[in-house]
Amino acid sequence: MASSSGTSSGSYMLQNSGSEEDLQLLMDQRKRKRMISNRESARRSRMRKQKHLDDLVSQVAQLRKENQQILTSVNITTQQYMSVEAENSVLRAQVGELSHRLESLNEIIEVLNASTGVYGASNSFFDQTNSLFNPFNMAYLNQPIVASADMFQY
C-alpha cells in the first residue's frame, strides 16, 4: 500500500508537473497575446491621436485662410464705405449750396414780382427801378456808355 500510494503520488506529481508546465505555457501564451493586443491597441491609439492632430492642424490652416479672407473683405468694405461716405458728404455740401442758390433765386423772383406788380403790390422804389430789374425791358441797353480818358489809369 505504501508503495502503491508512493507510486500514485509520484505519478500524480509527474502529471501535476506536466499539467503545471502546460498551465504555465498557456499563461505565457495568454500574456504574450495580451501584450501583443495591448501593443496593437496602443499603436491604433497613437494613430488615432496623430490623425486627430493632423485634422486639427488642417482645420487651423483652413480657419486662418477664412479669417484672412474675411479681413480682406472687411477692409474692402470699409474702403467702399469711406468712399461712399466722402461722396455723400460732397453731395450734402452740393445740396446745401444749391438750396442756398434756390433761396436766393426765389428772393430775386419775389423782388421782381413785387416790382412789376404781379401780385398787386405797388412800391415807388420798385416802380423807379423797374427798368433795371425787368429783363424784358431793354431800354437801358440802348443808352450810350460814357467814358473819358481820365477814367482809365494805367
Image (spheres, helix red, strand yellow):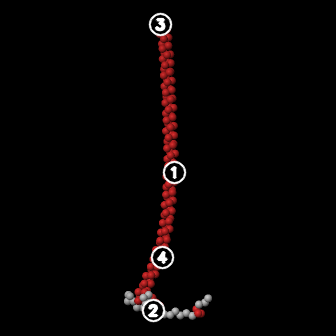
Q: Which residue is mark 3?
A: 4
Task: Measure how far apart labels 4 and 3 are at the Cα level.
Answer: 135 Å
Compared with 65, 50 (above or below) is above
Q: Secondary structure at mark 4?
A: helix
Q: Amino acid at mark 1?
A: Arg
Q: Nearer the viewer, residue 114 or 150?
A: 150
Check the picture and name the quadrant holding the C terminus. bottom right
Q: Residue 64: which disc?
A: 1
Q: Amino acid at mark 2?
A: Ala
Cβ atoms under marks 1 and 3 closer than 8 Å: no
**Label located before the other in sequence (2 or 4):** 4
Q: Position of residue 98 (x, y in %)?
A: 46, 76
Mark 4 Cα within 10 Å, few/some/many (few <14, many 20+)? few
Q: Residue 139: which disc?
A: 2
**Label located before the other in sequence (3 or 2):** 3
Q: Which residue is mark 4?
A: 97
